[in-house]
Image: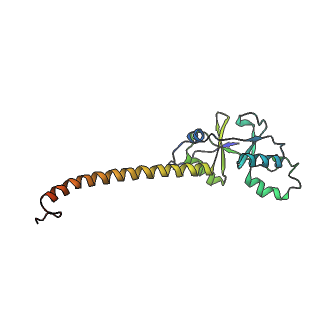
Amino acid sequence: MANAPPIAHCDSYSAQISQLLDARRQFCAKVAPDASVRSAVDMMVKHHIGILLISSDPLSSSASNILGVFSERDFLTKCSDLPSLLTTPVSSIMSSSVLTVPPHFSVGECMAVMVAREIRHLPVVDNDVIVGMVSMRDLVRQVAEDHEAHVKELSSQVTKLANAYHGAKGGEEEETARKGSWWGWSA
């Protein structure tokens, strides 16, 4: 298990992952290494998740117990050669290189790590405690929500400026109309 290094120049999406986890209340499923591939897949389907942590102690939240991950991609790329999904232990096809991030990482930093490593999920670990899991979908959703909020704010500011401008012009137009002509010429 390795911590992802900070990525420079990725502060355009600066919300911290801890804020994302607080808002989403991520479910972080774990299974033992001797769990069958079938049971792991059943758990993923039941909980609508794309990844499981393989842990020497699935009831513990300690990151030091993480042995690997089992993802949809592992299943699709490695399971066609397996003789029986019912009995094969998930540890035989899990990805054993697990990259984690701390909760203070930004959305942009996590996206950069995921793109660079070609992965779609990152366990979030704080002081050796697994605090959640973020997916590329979570990050993209956060970016889209932030952009939508920014667009709404800009739209509101443009509307206020336009109303202020037209309000000031409205006063001039009333004065011109009182003089007898819209364009300022006498009738």
**Split into 4 quadrants, where in the image is the C terminus?**
bottom left
| Quarter of the figure with residue 106 | top right
| Towards the viewer: 180 or 94 | 180
Tell me what residue is drawn at x 20 percent, y 53 percent.
171
**Split into 4 quadrants, where in the image is the N terminus?**
top right
| Towards the viewer: 173 or 141 | 173
| Towards the viewer: 21 or 174 | 174
Tell me what residue is drawn at x 18 percent, y 63 percent.
182
Q: Quick check: 66 left or right of 7?
A: right
| Quarter of the figure with residue 16 | top right
Q: What is the x, y in percent for residue 64? A: 72, 36
Tell me what residue is drawn at x 52 percent, y 48 percent.
13
Q: Is residue 7 visible?
A: no
Q: Quick check: 83 left or right of 7?
A: right
Q: Is residue 46 visible?
A: yes
Q: What is the x, y in percent for residue 178? A: 14, 57
Q: What is the x, y in percent for residue 79? A: 81, 56
